Image (cartoon, rainbow, N blue to C red):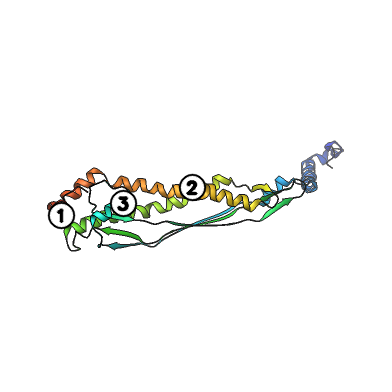
Amino acid sequence: MVESAGWLYPHKEDTVKTPLIAALVLAAALPAAARGANPSFEQRCEQEMKPMFEVSLRESGYTVDNTVSSRVLNNRSVHHYAGEQMLGMTALEARTVVSFDGPALADKASGRECVAPRISVALTFPKMSVFVAREFAPASCSYRQVLEHELRHVQLYRDQFPGLVERVRHGLAARFGGKPLYADHGKGLEALEADIDNWLRPFIKAEIGRMEVAQAAMDTPDESFRLSIACNGELANNLGNRY
């Protein structure tokens, strides 16, 4: 207990020592009081059960395929127009593996528990498939022009990968806010799994889908016209359609 400081002033020469003595008494007393307090269940959860997240990404480059006709490529494309023939296409496949676990802290009095989410997200992009329509011979100017355009798509995907990782990390941090997940006793991991299925997986899918917006923006009418007149009109002559 900290006594009143009045008794520390019996002599004038003691006055200089008083602030130091009072400070020592107070500093010693505060931790003792804190140690005597029993933290609540929620306080223990907030202090001890912090979430941990890991997000990784691996990509494997690209391959070039010159064996598919422009008409077949058009049928495969999600951005095609009826009757058009496609000069080239870049196809990307995304695979996502989510692993999760979490230690739990139980409170018998309330019948609840808190779980510290441990979530690992592995984003994997196998080799991108870069298609150049088989109507264009590999040694031709047309082939080189189409390939150059498709490799710009490849580079754009690669430029977007770091942002994808950061958005997933930020989404996880915002979702849990550095706090544990509360549930009925024995239901913590079940609640975490439900959150992953109902929120995290759709969230990741939507974030991957956002990359397609920038990809589609690259195929502008101006770019179509540029390619159609490239190589002295060779592309247009071969296909008879705009890109």
Residue at 74%, 47% in the rendered image: 111
**Circles 3 and 1: CB distance less than 8 Å?**
no
- How far across and down, in percent of the image, does residue 43 sit? 71, 46
Tell us which disc is closer to us: 2 or 1. Answer: 1
* Marker disc for residue 94: none
Q: In the rendered structure, which amino acid carries the disc numbered 3?
A: Ser
Identify the mark nearer the N-term, 2 or 1: 2
Identify the mark nearer the N-term, 3 or 1: 3
Alpha carbon separation for disc pair 3 and 2: 24 Å
Residue at image mark 1? 238
Q: Residue furthest top?
A: 6
Q: In the rendered structure, which amino acid carries the disc numbered 1?
A: Asn
**Circles 3 and 2: CB distance less than 8 Å?**
no
Tell us which disc is closer to us: 3 or 2. Answer: 3
- How far across and down, in percent of the image, does residue 88 sit? 26, 55
* Marker disc for residue 77: 3
Q: Nearer the viewer, residue 63 or 44?
A: 63
**Circles 2 and 1: CB distance less than 8 Å?**
no
Q: Nearer the viewer, residue 117 or 13?
A: 117
- Quadrant in which the N terminus is drawn: top right
- For residue 22, above or below residue 186: above
Residue at image mark 2? 203
Q: Residue furthest left?
A: 232
Within-10-Å neighbours for mark 1: few <14, some 14–19, many 20+: few
SS of the residue under disc 1: helix
